[in-house]
Image (tube, rainbow, N blue to C red):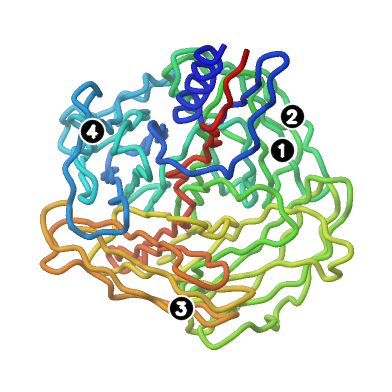
Amino acid sequence: MKRTTLSLIAGATALAAVTGFASLSAPDGAAAPRAATPTRLPVERAGLACPVPSTSEVAETLYTSYTPLSGGGTAPAKGGTSGSDKPAATAQLRPAASTSTSGGTAKGGKKAKPPKAPATVTAPGKPVTAEADGPAAPALAGAASGALAPGWTVQQTTVVPAGGARGLLGLSCGAPDTDFWFPAASTAKERQDYVHLTNPDDTAAVADIELYGPEGVLKSQFTEGIPVPARSTVPVLLSTLTGEAAQQSVTVHVTTRSGRVGAAIASADEKLGSDWIAPSADPASTAVLPGIPADATSVRLVAFVPGEDDADLKIQLVTQSGTIVPASARSLHVKSGMTAAVDLPDLTRGEVGSLMLSPSDPKKAAPVVAALRVVRGKGDDTEVAFVPATGAVSARATVADNRAKGTTLALTAVGAAAQVKVTASAGSGGGTPVTKTVTVKEGTTTAVPDLVPEGLKGSYALTVEPVSGGKVYAARTLAVPLDGTPMFTVQTFVDDRGTVEVPSARQDLGVLD
């Protein structure tokens, strides 16, 4: 009996180390072990999916793959695992066959080529890049294991210098999931918004897409039971899903009936430019949308309430000098099941800022999802980006593909002052990582525009880790001007879920008769 009991506990503990969950039950007649405090262990496997970057023949895409160092160090570490009986650590993306291939050629009439061994990481602490040009660049899916799994991130950055999809499109490739919210999408005539569903698994997935406009659910067709075959991607043009009048602001809800997918929306506006719309944070009664550029010329807030109660939201701008109420809009009423939007002209007034939404009456809080459409430039020289609501960085978060010029990190503290550690990694082509501790005052946004690795060659990653104090929200703006157009993209920092909670089992069991 004693040997059997110990075997059961040992097996359950081993399961917990891999899956993050295990439950222990004592044999009949035995006293169950007292609950122990859960511990956190590094994840052993992480998966990501990157959508097809562009259908433009002149598109140029850079993939940057990176795993941060464990323990917060700055010295590059060797890959692999220490145990001789364990397989070497890996972190690699591979093409996912598209259900709608675009074919096409790259510049100069040459056939477009997918990236070679796409951005394969061999050791934590150093980014690896790969390029892919033209419309034939595929969707990518992959996994990281061992020492390369905790915090693995991939940034997909595409420059389209001309045409209807002109712009700088940036996206942190997402982990596959079953539920996504996308405020700030559109079915307007000047917009071409495609939701990309990428299935990284070996079994098929089935997805549903719901559209919500200012008056509620948009009558739609072909949105239920969308098959996404194994190792494939399906792009869906939103305007083809409904026969109702075009809507400037639409909320998109993607769920899966079976399996899981990576989801993102590619948005192209014939007048403003193009970028990716990343998913909003899960519905919550408060929302923070960080990293609005100082020179934004137009900002539109889009919000949606998925619950049964309406939401009355207080709008606040968190600036470098403090938190204020914008003169253009103090509040927003959002009816249940309906998309609400408000334009916020002259919002930032020359300072990097973040928008914070909270219940006007804390006793009547309702969960919301939200996103911003941000425009820089004027006239024909404009560019657009999208900033979704994001969660606070609880342990660690990273955004890859930063450049020596044009990178600005925005850190916002709400509720209490905070300190965070920011690490600029080594460059993909060389350089020495640097680390800086940044103090963010309560109710302010701090801009960090100059944290660059020493001797940088190539692109680098920025990692944010809380040190003390309150919650911190972060976003990175990458600006790459081109022929007078202020091209830019904004990526929020999403906690990398590099560790998993594992229950501990007591070892002081008595002898059982």
Q: Quadrant of residue 98?
A: top left
23 and 1: which is toward the camera? 1
Question: Cβ–Cβ below 8 Å for labels 1 and 2?
Answer: yes
Residue type pointed to by label 1:
Leu
> From the viewer's perspective, is the residue at label 1 or at label 2 nearer?
1
Of the numbered discs in the image, which one, if any, rests on residue 211? 1
Residue type pointed to by label 4:
Thr
Earlier sequence position, callout 4 versus callout 1: 4
Q: How far separated are the C-alphas under marks 4 and 3? A: 38 Å
Q: Which element type, helix, strand or loop, lies under badge 4? A: loop
Of the numbered discs in the image, which one, if any, rests on residue 81? 4
- Horizontal arrangement in the rendering, residue 501 relative to residue 85 (left or right): right
Q: Residue at x 28, y 27 (%)?
A: 104
User: Which residue position is annotated with label 2?
Assistant: 220
Earlier sequence position, callout 1 versus callout 3: 1
Instruction: Locate the N terminus and report the quarter of the image it occupies.
Output: top right
> From the viewer's perspective, is the residue at label 4 or at label 1 nearer?
4
Tell me the crowding category of disc 1: few under 14, some 14 to 19, or many 20 or more residues within 10 angstroms, Cα based. Answer: many
